Amino acid sequence: MIKLIFIALFGCISTIEAQLVMSKASPPPNIVFILTDDQDTLLGGMDPLVKVKKLLQDEGTTFTNMFTSTPLCCPSRASILTGRYSHNHETLNNSISGNCSSLYWQKTFETQTLAVAAKKANYRTFFAGKYLNQYGGKSVGGPQHVPVGWDQWFGLVGNSKYYNYTISDNGKPVQHGADYHEDYLTDLLANKSVDFIHNHKMRYIQPFFMMISTPAPHSPWDAAPQYSKMYQNNTAPHTPSYNTKAVNKHWLVRQATHPMTKESVDYSDNAFRSRWRALKSVDDLVERVINALSKMKQLDNSYVIFSSDNGYHLGQFSLPIDKRQLYEFDLRVPLIIRGPGVSKNVTRSEPIVNVDIAPTVADIVNGGKGDFPLIMDGESLVPLLNINNKPEWRSDFLVEYQGEGKESPPPGCSPTWRGVSQCFPSCVCEDAYNNTYSCVRTLQPQHKVDLMYCEFTDTETFVELYNHTVDPHQLNNIKNTVDPTVLVKMNKRLIMLGLCSGKTCRAQSYIDYSNLSTTKHWFVDALSRFWQHTQTWFNPNVSPL
Protein backbone atom coordinates (compact mmCIF):
# COMPACT_ATOMS: atom_id res chain seq x y z
CA MET A 1 0.00 0.00 0.00
CA ILE A 2 2.82 2.35 0.96
CA LYS A 3 4.59 1.41 -2.27
CA LEU A 4 1.49 2.26 -4.31
CA ILE A 5 1.10 5.59 -2.54
CA PHE A 6 4.79 6.35 -3.20
CA ILE A 7 4.42 5.45 -6.87
CA ALA A 8 1.29 7.59 -7.16
CA LEU A 9 2.94 10.49 -5.36
CA PHE A 10 6.07 10.17 -7.47
CA GLY A 11 3.89 10.12 -10.56
CA CYS A 12 2.13 13.34 -9.48
CA ILE A 13 5.45 15.04 -8.73
CA SER A 14 6.82 13.96 -12.10
CA THR A 15 3.70 15.30 -13.85
CA ILE A 16 3.96 18.62 -12.01
CA GLU A 17 7.66 18.87 -12.84
CA ALA A 18 6.93 18.10 -16.48
CA GLN A 19 4.25 20.80 -16.56
CA LEU A 20 6.61 23.30 -15.01
CA VAL A 21 9.33 22.46 -17.51
CA MET A 22 6.82 22.76 -20.38
CA SER A 23 5.57 26.07 -19.01
CA LYS A 24 9.10 27.38 -18.63
CA ALA A 25 10.04 26.21 -22.12
CA SER A 26 7.03 27.77 -23.84
CA PRO A 27 5.23 30.40 -21.77
CA PRO A 28 2.09 31.91 -23.29
CA PRO A 29 3.11 34.52 -25.88
CA ASN A 30 2.45 38.24 -25.60
CA ILE A 31 0.62 40.08 -28.38
CA VAL A 32 1.17 43.67 -29.51
CA PHE A 33 -1.31 44.94 -32.09
CA ILE A 34 -0.44 48.27 -33.72
CA LEU A 35 -3.29 49.81 -35.72
CA THR A 36 -2.86 52.91 -37.86
CA ASP A 37 -5.65 55.14 -39.19
CA ASP A 38 -6.35 55.53 -42.95
CA GLN A 39 -3.09 53.95 -44.11
CA ASP A 40 -3.16 52.77 -47.72
CA THR A 41 -0.84 50.34 -49.45
CA LEU A 42 -1.47 51.16 -53.13
CA LEU A 43 -0.45 54.84 -52.95
CA GLY A 44 2.87 54.32 -51.17
CA GLY A 45 1.50 54.31 -47.65
CA MET A 46 4.22 51.93 -46.42
CA ASP A 47 7.12 53.74 -48.09
CA PRO A 48 8.03 56.11 -45.20
CA LEU A 49 8.19 53.23 -42.70
CA VAL A 50 11.78 52.11 -43.09
CA LYS A 51 11.99 50.89 -39.48
CA VAL A 52 8.80 48.88 -39.89
CA LYS A 53 10.36 47.15 -42.87
CA LYS A 54 13.49 46.24 -40.93
CA LEU A 55 11.84 45.30 -37.64
CA LEU A 56 8.57 43.75 -38.82
CA GLN A 57 8.62 42.86 -42.53
CA ASP A 58 12.16 41.45 -42.56
CA GLU A 59 11.44 39.59 -39.32
CA GLY A 60 7.96 38.37 -40.16
CA THR A 61 5.31 37.65 -42.78
CA THR A 62 3.65 40.29 -44.96
CA PHE A 63 0.17 39.55 -46.26
CA THR A 64 -0.08 41.17 -49.68
CA ASN A 65 -3.84 40.71 -50.09
CA MET A 66 -5.16 42.24 -46.88
CA PHE A 67 -8.51 44.05 -47.14
CA THR A 68 -10.94 45.93 -44.99
CA SER A 69 -14.52 44.68 -45.17
CA THR A 70 -15.82 48.26 -44.78
CA PRO A 71 -13.63 51.18 -45.97
CA LEU A 72 -14.43 53.57 -43.12
CA CYS A 73 -12.99 54.01 -39.65
CA CYS A 74 -15.73 53.08 -37.18
CA PRO A 75 -17.33 50.08 -38.91
CA SER A 76 -13.91 48.72 -39.83
CA ARG A 77 -12.67 49.09 -36.25
CA ALA A 78 -15.80 47.37 -34.99
CA SER A 79 -14.99 44.49 -37.35
CA ILE A 80 -11.40 44.40 -36.14
CA LEU A 81 -12.51 44.33 -32.50
CA THR A 82 -15.26 41.74 -32.89
CA GLY A 83 -14.18 39.64 -35.88
CA ARG A 84 -17.58 40.21 -37.45
CA TYR A 85 -18.87 41.82 -40.61
CA SER A 86 -20.75 45.12 -40.40
CA HIS A 87 -24.15 43.49 -40.91
CA ASN A 88 -23.48 41.36 -37.82
CA HIS A 89 -22.01 43.95 -35.43
CA GLU A 90 -24.44 46.57 -36.77
CA THR A 91 -21.96 49.46 -36.87
CA LEU A 92 -22.80 50.97 -40.22
CA ASN A 93 -20.86 54.25 -40.35
CA ASN A 94 -19.18 56.90 -38.17
CA SER A 95 -22.35 58.20 -36.52
CA ILE A 96 -23.94 57.29 -33.20
CA SER A 97 -27.15 56.53 -35.08
CA GLY A 98 -25.01 54.22 -37.19
CA ASN A 99 -24.05 52.38 -33.96
CA CYS A 100 -20.56 53.87 -33.65
CA SER A 101 -19.82 53.45 -29.92
CA SER A 102 -23.53 53.81 -29.17
CA LEU A 103 -25.05 52.69 -25.87
CA TYR A 104 -26.44 49.69 -27.73
CA TRP A 105 -22.95 48.82 -29.02
CA GLN A 106 -21.57 49.07 -25.48
CA LYS A 107 -24.17 46.67 -24.08
CA THR A 108 -23.88 44.11 -26.86
CA PHE A 109 -20.96 43.82 -29.24
CA GLU A 110 -18.44 45.59 -27.03
CA THR A 111 -18.72 42.62 -24.66
CA GLN A 112 -17.55 40.28 -27.45
CA THR A 113 -14.23 41.83 -28.49
CA LEU A 114 -10.72 40.47 -28.75
CA ALA A 115 -9.94 42.13 -25.41
CA VAL A 116 -12.63 40.07 -23.70
CA ALA A 117 -11.21 36.92 -25.29
CA ALA A 118 -7.74 37.81 -24.02
CA LYS A 119 -9.03 38.49 -20.50
CA LYS A 120 -10.78 35.13 -20.41
CA ALA A 121 -7.43 33.53 -21.25
CA ASN A 122 -5.83 35.30 -18.24
CA TYR A 123 -4.01 37.94 -20.28
CA ARG A 124 -3.38 41.41 -18.94
CA THR A 125 -4.76 43.91 -21.46
CA PHE A 126 -3.75 47.43 -22.48
CA PHE A 127 -5.30 49.89 -24.92
CA ALA A 128 -3.88 53.25 -26.02
CA GLY A 129 -5.11 55.60 -28.75
CA LYS A 130 -8.10 55.98 -31.02
CA TYR A 131 -10.91 53.53 -30.31
CA LEU A 132 -14.16 54.34 -32.14
CA ASN A 133 -14.96 57.74 -33.65
CA GLN A 134 -17.82 58.52 -31.25
CA TYR A 135 -16.14 57.15 -28.12
CA GLY A 136 -16.32 59.44 -25.11
CA GLY A 137 -19.25 61.59 -26.26
CA LYS A 138 -21.59 62.86 -23.56
CA SER A 139 -24.59 60.96 -24.93
CA VAL A 140 -22.71 57.64 -24.86
CA GLY A 141 -21.24 57.75 -21.37
CA GLY A 142 -18.43 60.26 -21.75
CA PRO A 143 -14.77 59.45 -21.11
CA GLN A 144 -15.83 57.79 -17.86
CA HIS A 145 -16.91 54.76 -19.87
CA VAL A 146 -14.12 52.16 -20.04
CA PRO A 147 -14.92 49.36 -22.49
CA VAL A 148 -15.08 45.92 -20.92
CA GLY A 149 -11.99 43.73 -21.23
CA TRP A 150 -9.28 46.34 -20.80
CA ASP A 151 -7.13 46.44 -17.64
CA GLN A 152 -5.30 49.59 -18.68
CA TRP A 153 -7.26 52.09 -20.75
CA PHE A 154 -5.81 55.20 -22.39
CA GLY A 155 -8.47 56.00 -24.97
CA LEU A 156 -8.77 59.06 -27.20
CA VAL A 157 -12.11 60.83 -26.98
CA GLY A 158 -13.54 61.22 -30.48
CA ASN A 159 -11.71 61.12 -33.78
CA SER A 160 -8.00 61.31 -34.52
CA LYS A 161 -6.08 64.34 -33.36
CA TYR A 162 -2.44 65.03 -32.59
CA TYR A 163 -2.85 68.06 -30.29
CA ASN A 164 -5.62 69.60 -28.18
CA TYR A 165 -7.51 66.42 -27.36
CA THR A 166 -8.97 64.59 -24.37
CA ILE A 167 -7.81 61.20 -23.16
CA SER A 168 -9.78 58.83 -20.95
CA ASP A 169 -7.10 57.62 -18.55
CA ASN A 170 -8.85 54.60 -17.03
CA GLY A 171 -12.08 56.57 -17.02
CA LYS A 172 -10.66 59.92 -15.91
CA PRO A 173 -10.71 62.67 -18.57
CA VAL A 174 -7.30 64.29 -19.09
CA GLN A 175 -6.91 67.35 -21.32
CA HIS A 176 -3.89 67.76 -23.56
CA GLY A 177 -2.67 70.90 -25.29
CA ALA A 178 -0.33 71.82 -28.11
CA ASP A 179 3.15 71.23 -26.66
CA TYR A 180 5.05 68.75 -28.78
CA HIS A 181 7.06 67.22 -25.94
CA GLU A 182 4.04 66.77 -23.68
CA ASP A 183 1.10 66.29 -26.01
CA TYR A 184 1.98 64.97 -29.48
CA LEU A 185 -0.31 61.95 -29.46
CA THR A 186 1.71 59.41 -31.49
CA ASP A 187 4.72 59.96 -29.24
CA LEU A 188 2.56 59.92 -26.12
CA LEU A 189 1.16 56.54 -27.15
CA ALA A 190 4.72 55.28 -27.61
CA ASN A 191 5.63 56.51 -24.11
CA LYS A 192 2.60 54.85 -22.53
CA SER A 193 3.22 51.61 -24.38
CA VAL A 194 6.87 51.39 -23.40
CA ASP A 195 5.97 52.14 -19.76
CA PHE A 196 3.37 49.37 -19.80
CA ILE A 197 5.88 46.83 -21.16
CA HIS A 198 8.46 47.76 -18.51
CA ASN A 199 6.01 47.84 -15.61
CA HIS A 200 4.27 44.65 -16.64
CA LYS A 201 7.50 42.66 -16.63
CA MET A 202 8.37 44.00 -13.16
CA ARG A 203 4.95 43.30 -11.58
CA TYR A 204 3.16 40.49 -13.39
CA ILE A 205 3.91 36.98 -14.57
CA GLN A 206 0.89 36.65 -16.84
CA PRO A 207 1.18 37.40 -20.58
CA PHE A 208 -0.16 40.65 -22.02
CA PHE A 209 -2.19 41.82 -24.99
CA MET A 210 -1.61 45.39 -26.14
CA MET A 211 -3.52 47.38 -28.74
CA ILE A 212 -1.84 50.62 -29.79
CA SER A 213 -4.03 52.69 -32.12
CA THR A 214 -2.28 55.70 -33.65
CA PRO A 215 -3.96 58.78 -35.13
CA ALA A 216 -1.58 58.75 -38.10
CA PRO A 217 -1.91 59.12 -40.98
CA HIS A 218 -5.48 60.45 -40.49
CA SER A 219 -6.14 64.16 -40.88
CA PRO A 220 -5.31 66.77 -39.60
CA TRP A 221 -1.91 65.26 -40.43
CA ASP A 222 0.13 67.19 -37.86
CA ALA A 223 3.74 66.12 -38.18
CA ALA A 224 6.32 66.06 -35.43
CA PRO A 225 8.62 69.11 -35.77
CA GLN A 226 11.60 67.03 -36.90
CA TYR A 227 9.61 65.67 -39.84
CA SER A 228 7.63 68.75 -40.84
CA LYS A 229 9.89 69.71 -43.77
CA MET A 230 10.24 66.29 -45.36
CA TYR A 231 8.93 65.29 -48.79
CA GLN A 232 8.46 68.87 -49.98
CA ASN A 233 8.76 67.88 -53.63
CA ASN A 234 6.48 64.84 -53.44
CA THR A 235 3.04 64.81 -55.02
CA ALA A 236 0.10 62.44 -54.87
CA PRO A 237 0.84 59.33 -56.98
CA HIS A 238 -0.39 59.67 -60.54
CA THR A 239 -1.80 56.17 -60.87
CA PRO A 240 -3.71 55.22 -64.05
CA SER A 241 -6.95 56.28 -62.33
CA TYR A 242 -5.56 59.59 -61.06
CA ASN A 243 -7.51 62.62 -62.29
CA THR A 244 -9.52 60.48 -64.71
CA LYS A 245 -13.17 60.91 -65.51
CA ALA A 246 -15.30 58.21 -63.92
CA VAL A 247 -17.13 56.31 -66.64
CA ASN A 248 -19.89 53.78 -66.00
CA LYS A 249 -19.56 54.13 -62.24
CA HIS A 250 -21.94 54.98 -59.42
CA TRP A 251 -23.39 58.50 -59.67
CA LEU A 252 -21.43 59.71 -56.61
CA VAL A 253 -18.13 59.02 -58.36
CA ARG A 254 -19.40 60.38 -61.68
CA GLN A 255 -20.21 63.75 -60.10
CA ALA A 256 -16.56 64.49 -59.30
CA THR A 257 -15.27 67.56 -61.15
CA HIS A 258 -13.00 66.55 -64.03
CA PRO A 259 -10.36 67.57 -64.64
CA MET A 260 -9.64 68.28 -60.99
CA THR A 261 -9.44 71.93 -60.04
CA LYS A 262 -6.11 73.38 -58.99
CA GLU A 263 -7.50 73.60 -55.47
CA SER A 264 -8.21 69.86 -55.45
CA VAL A 265 -4.83 68.96 -56.95
CA ASP A 266 -2.97 71.11 -54.42
CA TYR A 267 -5.08 69.74 -51.57
CA SER A 268 -4.37 66.14 -52.58
CA ASP A 269 -0.65 66.80 -52.95
CA ASN A 270 -0.44 68.46 -49.56
CA ALA A 271 -2.41 65.60 -47.97
CA PHE A 272 -0.01 63.07 -49.47
CA ARG A 273 3.07 64.85 -48.11
CA SER A 274 1.47 65.43 -44.72
CA ARG A 275 0.39 61.80 -44.38
CA TRP A 276 3.92 60.57 -44.98
CA ARG A 277 5.29 63.05 -42.44
CA ALA A 278 2.81 61.89 -39.80
CA LEU A 279 3.75 58.27 -40.49
CA LYS A 280 7.39 58.91 -39.57
CA SER A 281 6.36 59.08 -35.92
CA VAL A 282 4.58 55.72 -36.29
CA ASP A 283 7.90 54.35 -37.52
CA ASP A 284 9.53 55.65 -34.34
CA LEU A 285 6.76 54.17 -32.20
CA VAL A 286 7.28 50.71 -33.69
CA GLU A 287 11.03 50.94 -33.06
CA ARG A 288 10.52 51.98 -29.44
CA VAL A 289 8.03 49.18 -28.78
CA ILE A 290 10.34 46.57 -30.33
CA ASN A 291 13.29 47.89 -28.32
CA ALA A 292 11.26 47.79 -25.11
CA LEU A 293 10.24 44.19 -25.75
CA SER A 294 13.87 43.31 -26.46
CA LYS A 295 15.16 45.08 -23.34
CA MET A 296 12.67 43.20 -21.15
CA LYS A 297 13.59 39.92 -22.90
CA GLN A 298 10.06 39.56 -24.25
CA LEU A 299 10.63 40.05 -27.98
CA ASP A 300 11.21 36.40 -28.87
CA ASN A 301 7.96 35.45 -27.14
CA SER A 302 5.80 38.25 -28.54
CA TYR A 303 3.64 38.47 -31.63
CA VAL A 304 3.61 41.93 -33.17
CA ILE A 305 0.74 42.64 -35.59
CA PHE A 306 0.71 45.78 -37.75
CA SER A 307 -2.31 46.88 -39.78
CA SER A 308 -4.73 49.73 -40.54
CA ASP A 309 -8.49 50.25 -40.55
CA ASN A 310 -8.93 51.32 -44.20
CA GLY A 311 -7.07 52.60 -47.23
CA TYR A 312 -7.29 56.00 -48.90
CA HIS A 313 -7.47 57.83 -52.21
CA LEU A 314 -5.80 61.03 -53.39
CA GLY A 315 -7.20 62.09 -56.75
CA GLN A 316 -8.17 58.67 -58.07
CA PHE A 317 -11.21 59.02 -60.36
CA SER A 318 -10.88 62.78 -59.64
CA LEU A 319 -11.94 62.27 -55.98
CA PRO A 320 -9.55 64.59 -54.08
CA ILE A 321 -9.22 62.85 -50.67
CA ASP A 322 -11.10 60.34 -48.55
CA LYS A 323 -11.99 56.64 -48.28
CA ARG A 324 -15.52 55.02 -48.29
CA GLN A 325 -15.39 53.80 -51.90
CA LEU A 326 -15.41 50.21 -53.16
CA TYR A 327 -12.14 50.53 -55.06
CA GLU A 328 -8.85 48.83 -54.24
CA PHE A 329 -7.09 51.96 -53.02
CA ASP A 330 -9.70 52.31 -50.24
CA LEU A 331 -9.95 48.59 -49.44
CA ARG A 332 -6.35 47.38 -49.31
CA VAL A 333 -4.46 47.86 -46.04
CA PRO A 334 -1.15 46.60 -44.67
CA LEU A 335 -0.83 43.47 -42.55
CA ILE A 336 2.47 42.29 -41.12
CA ILE A 337 2.97 39.73 -38.35
CA ARG A 338 6.18 38.73 -36.59
CA GLY A 339 6.53 36.42 -33.61
CA PRO A 340 7.42 32.93 -32.41
CA GLY A 341 7.15 30.43 -35.24
CA VAL A 342 6.32 33.09 -37.84
CA SER A 343 8.24 32.75 -41.11
CA LYS A 344 10.64 35.64 -41.68
CA ASN A 345 10.96 37.97 -44.64
CA VAL A 346 8.26 36.24 -46.66
CA THR A 347 4.94 37.20 -48.22
CA ARG A 348 1.65 35.37 -48.49
CA SER A 349 -1.02 36.07 -51.08
CA GLU A 350 -4.12 34.48 -49.53
CA PRO A 351 -7.05 36.94 -49.25
CA ILE A 352 -7.18 38.23 -45.67
CA VAL A 353 -9.90 40.46 -44.20
CA ASN A 354 -10.03 42.69 -41.12
CA VAL A 355 -12.53 40.24 -39.56
CA ASP A 356 -9.61 37.77 -39.29
CA ILE A 357 -7.69 39.79 -36.71
CA ALA A 358 -9.91 39.08 -33.69
CA PRO A 359 -10.05 35.30 -34.33
CA THR A 360 -6.27 35.31 -34.72
CA VAL A 361 -5.75 37.05 -31.37
CA ALA A 362 -8.29 34.78 -29.68
CA ASP A 363 -6.63 31.70 -31.18
CA ILE A 364 -3.16 32.75 -30.02
CA VAL A 365 -4.23 33.47 -26.44
CA ASN A 366 -5.97 30.07 -26.34
CA GLY A 367 -2.92 28.14 -27.44
CA GLY A 368 -2.88 28.49 -31.22
CA LYS A 369 -4.92 25.37 -31.98
CA GLY A 370 -7.87 26.99 -33.74
CA ASP A 371 -9.85 27.90 -30.64
CA PHE A 372 -11.74 31.18 -31.07
CA PRO A 373 -15.37 32.26 -30.50
CA LEU A 374 -17.51 30.67 -33.20
CA ILE A 375 -19.68 33.79 -33.30
CA MET A 376 -16.81 35.50 -35.15
CA ASP A 377 -17.10 35.64 -38.94
CA GLY A 378 -13.38 35.60 -39.69
CA GLU A 379 -10.66 32.95 -39.72
CA SER A 380 -7.59 32.57 -37.52
CA LEU A 381 -4.39 33.37 -39.40
CA VAL A 382 -2.29 31.05 -37.22
CA PRO A 383 -2.16 28.31 -39.91
CA LEU A 384 -0.68 30.85 -42.33
CA LEU A 385 2.14 32.02 -40.06
CA ASN A 386 4.44 29.21 -41.24
CA ILE A 387 5.19 29.61 -44.93
CA ASN A 388 5.35 25.83 -45.35
CA ASN A 389 1.70 25.41 -44.36
CA LYS A 390 -0.78 25.37 -47.25
CA PRO A 391 -4.20 25.24 -45.59
CA GLU A 392 -7.45 25.44 -47.49
CA TRP A 393 -8.45 29.07 -47.56
CA ARG A 394 -11.29 31.31 -48.65
CA SER A 395 -11.57 32.41 -52.26
CA ASP A 396 -13.96 35.32 -51.65
CA PHE A 397 -15.26 37.67 -48.98
CA LEU A 398 -17.76 40.45 -48.36
CA VAL A 399 -17.35 44.22 -48.61
CA GLU A 400 -20.26 46.37 -47.39
CA TYR A 401 -20.96 49.98 -46.50
CA GLN A 402 -23.96 52.17 -45.66
CA GLY A 403 -23.40 55.77 -46.71
CA GLU A 404 -23.91 58.95 -44.72
CA GLY A 405 -25.45 62.20 -45.95
CA LYS A 406 -27.04 65.38 -44.67
CA GLU A 407 -30.42 66.85 -45.44
CA SER A 408 -29.03 70.38 -45.71
CA PRO A 409 -26.82 71.29 -48.69
CA PRO A 410 -23.07 71.46 -48.03
CA PRO A 411 -21.82 75.00 -47.25
CA GLY A 412 -20.66 76.90 -50.32
CA CYS A 413 -22.07 74.34 -52.74
CA SER A 414 -25.27 74.17 -54.75
CA PRO A 415 -28.38 74.77 -52.62
CA THR A 416 -30.14 71.98 -54.54
CA TRP A 417 -27.79 69.28 -53.22
CA ARG A 418 -29.36 67.01 -50.63
CA GLY A 419 -28.28 63.81 -48.93
CA VAL A 420 -24.55 64.24 -49.56
CA SER A 421 -21.55 64.80 -47.27
CA GLN A 422 -17.77 65.19 -47.23
CA CYS A 423 -17.99 67.81 -50.01
CA PHE A 424 -14.47 69.23 -50.01
CA PRO A 425 -12.41 70.54 -51.62
CA SER A 426 -14.07 72.15 -54.64
CA CYS A 427 -17.52 70.82 -53.62
CA VAL A 428 -16.63 67.27 -54.66
CA CYS A 429 -18.85 65.07 -52.47
CA GLU A 430 -17.30 61.82 -51.25
CA ASP A 431 -20.35 60.31 -49.55
CA ALA A 432 -24.15 60.21 -49.68
CA TYR A 433 -27.06 58.42 -48.08
CA ASN A 434 -27.24 56.06 -51.01
CA ASN A 435 -23.52 55.45 -51.30
CA THR A 436 -24.68 52.14 -49.89
CA TYR A 437 -23.33 49.00 -51.45
CA SER A 438 -22.36 45.40 -50.91
CA CYS A 439 -19.73 43.53 -52.87
CA VAL A 440 -18.22 40.11 -53.24
CA ARG A 441 -14.46 40.21 -53.79
CA THR A 442 -13.19 37.01 -55.40
CA LEU A 443 -9.55 35.88 -55.56
CA GLN A 444 -8.77 32.50 -57.13
CA PRO A 445 -5.13 32.86 -58.22
CA GLN A 446 -4.87 29.20 -59.26
CA HIS A 447 -7.63 29.86 -61.79
CA LYS A 448 -6.49 33.41 -62.63
CA VAL A 449 -9.76 34.82 -61.29
CA ASP A 450 -9.61 38.23 -59.63
CA LEU A 451 -13.03 39.91 -59.56
CA MET A 452 -15.02 42.57 -57.74
CA TYR A 453 -18.82 42.58 -58.05
CA CYS A 454 -20.87 45.29 -56.32
CA GLU A 455 -24.54 46.21 -56.04
CA PHE A 456 -25.76 49.62 -54.86
CA THR A 457 -28.93 50.21 -52.88
CA ASP A 458 -30.25 53.24 -54.73
CA THR A 459 -32.79 54.16 -57.35
CA GLU A 460 -30.30 53.32 -60.09
CA THR A 461 -29.81 49.80 -58.68
CA PHE A 462 -26.31 50.32 -60.02
CA VAL A 463 -23.92 47.41 -60.55
CA GLU A 464 -20.13 47.49 -60.94
CA LEU A 465 -17.98 44.53 -61.97
CA TYR A 466 -14.21 44.57 -62.48
CA ASN A 467 -11.81 41.95 -63.76
CA HIS A 468 -8.61 42.83 -61.94
CA THR A 469 -6.58 40.30 -63.89
CA VAL A 470 -6.68 42.59 -66.92
CA ASP A 471 -7.84 45.81 -65.22
CA PRO A 472 -6.11 46.18 -61.83
CA HIS A 473 -7.03 49.88 -61.58
CA GLN A 474 -10.77 49.25 -62.07
CA LEU A 475 -11.05 51.56 -65.05
CA ASN A 476 -13.56 49.45 -66.99
CA ASN A 477 -16.85 48.31 -65.53
CA ILE A 478 -17.63 45.11 -67.45
CA LYS A 479 -21.18 44.57 -66.18
CA ASN A 480 -22.53 45.16 -69.69
CA THR A 481 -20.11 42.87 -71.54
CA VAL A 482 -19.63 39.90 -69.27
CA ASP A 483 -21.44 36.61 -69.76
CA PRO A 484 -24.73 37.03 -67.85
CA THR A 485 -24.25 33.74 -66.03
CA VAL A 486 -21.32 35.35 -64.22
CA LEU A 487 -23.61 38.11 -62.94
CA VAL A 488 -26.10 35.53 -61.73
CA LYS A 489 -23.43 33.52 -59.90
CA MET A 490 -21.96 36.59 -58.23
CA ASN A 491 -25.36 37.91 -57.24
CA LYS A 492 -26.21 34.58 -55.56
CA ARG A 493 -22.88 34.50 -53.75
CA LEU A 494 -23.32 38.11 -52.64
CA ILE A 495 -26.75 37.32 -51.19
CA MET A 496 -25.26 34.39 -49.28
CA LEU A 497 -22.39 36.44 -47.84
CA GLY A 498 -24.70 39.35 -47.04
CA LEU A 499 -26.75 37.05 -44.81
CA CYS A 500 -23.88 35.03 -43.34
CA SER A 501 -23.01 34.77 -39.68
CA GLY A 502 -20.17 32.94 -37.97
CA LYS A 503 -19.64 29.52 -39.53
CA THR A 504 -21.53 30.34 -42.71
CA CYS A 505 -19.20 33.30 -43.36
CA ARG A 506 -16.23 30.93 -43.11
CA ALA A 507 -17.72 28.22 -45.32
CA GLN A 508 -15.51 27.50 -48.33
CA SER A 509 -17.22 28.12 -51.64
CA TYR A 510 -15.55 27.60 -54.99
CA ILE A 511 -17.52 29.07 -57.91
CA ASP A 512 -16.42 28.67 -61.51
CA TYR A 513 -16.05 32.10 -63.14
CA SER A 514 -14.02 30.91 -66.11
CA ASN A 515 -16.65 32.07 -68.61
CA LEU A 516 -15.65 35.75 -68.51
CA SER A 517 -16.69 36.70 -72.01
CA THR A 518 -16.23 40.12 -73.62
CA THR A 519 -19.04 39.48 -76.11
CA LYS A 520 -22.33 41.13 -75.31
CA HIS A 521 -25.26 38.85 -74.71
CA TRP A 522 -28.65 40.11 -75.90
CA PHE A 523 -29.94 40.20 -72.31
CA VAL A 524 -26.96 42.17 -71.05
CA ASP A 525 -27.15 44.52 -74.00
CA ALA A 526 -30.81 45.24 -73.29
CA LEU A 527 -30.10 45.70 -69.60
CA SER A 528 -27.28 48.08 -70.46
CA ARG A 529 -29.55 50.24 -72.62
CA PHE A 530 -32.11 50.31 -69.82
CA TRP A 531 -29.48 51.44 -67.28
CA GLN A 532 -28.18 54.14 -69.62
CA HIS A 533 -31.73 55.40 -70.17
CA THR A 534 -32.58 55.49 -66.47
CA GLN A 535 -29.36 57.34 -65.61
CA THR A 536 -30.57 60.30 -67.68
CA TRP A 537 -33.37 60.72 -65.15
CA PHE A 538 -30.92 61.93 -62.54
CA ASN A 539 -29.16 65.22 -62.13
CA PRO A 540 -25.51 64.28 -61.50
CA ASN A 541 -25.29 67.05 -58.90
CA VAL A 542 -28.20 65.76 -56.85
CA SER A 543 -28.20 62.56 -54.85
CA PRO A 544 -30.81 60.25 -56.41
CA LEU A 545 -32.30 59.20 -53.08
Image: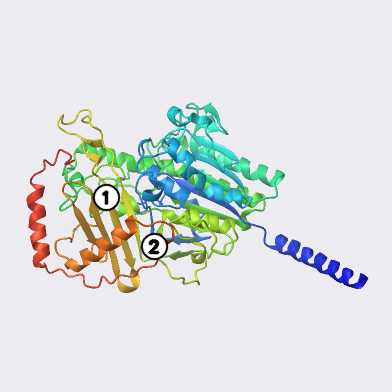
Circle count: 2
Q: Quadrant of the rendered structure where residue 170 is?
A: top right
Q: Please tell me the numbered disc located at residue 331.
A: none
Q: Amino acid at mark 2?
A: Pro
* Residue 528, above or below 516: above
Mark 1 or mark 2, which is nearer the start of the sequence?
Answer: 2
The residue positioned 11% from the left and 40% from the top of the image is 539
The residue positioned 76% from the left and 66% from the top of the image is 18
Question: Dot 1 corresponds to which residue?
Answer: 437
Q: Give neighbour class at mark 2: few <14, some 14-19, many 20+ (Cα, 10 Å).
A: some
Quarter in which the C terminus is drawn: top left
Question: Dot 2 corresponds to which residue?
Answer: 351
Estimate the spatial distance between the alpha carbons at disc 2 and disc 1, rounded to whole Å: 20 Å
Q: Can residue 54 be seen by looking at this rendering? A: no
Residue 542 pos. (x, y %): 15, 38
Does residue 456 appear left or right of residue 21 in this picture?
A: left
Q: Quadrant of the rendered structure where residue 190 is?
A: top right
Name the element at disc 1: strand
Residue 205 pos. (x, y %): 70, 50
Quarter in which the N terminus is drawn: bottom right
Residue 237 pos. (x, y %): 29, 50
Residue 276 pos. (x, y %): 39, 44
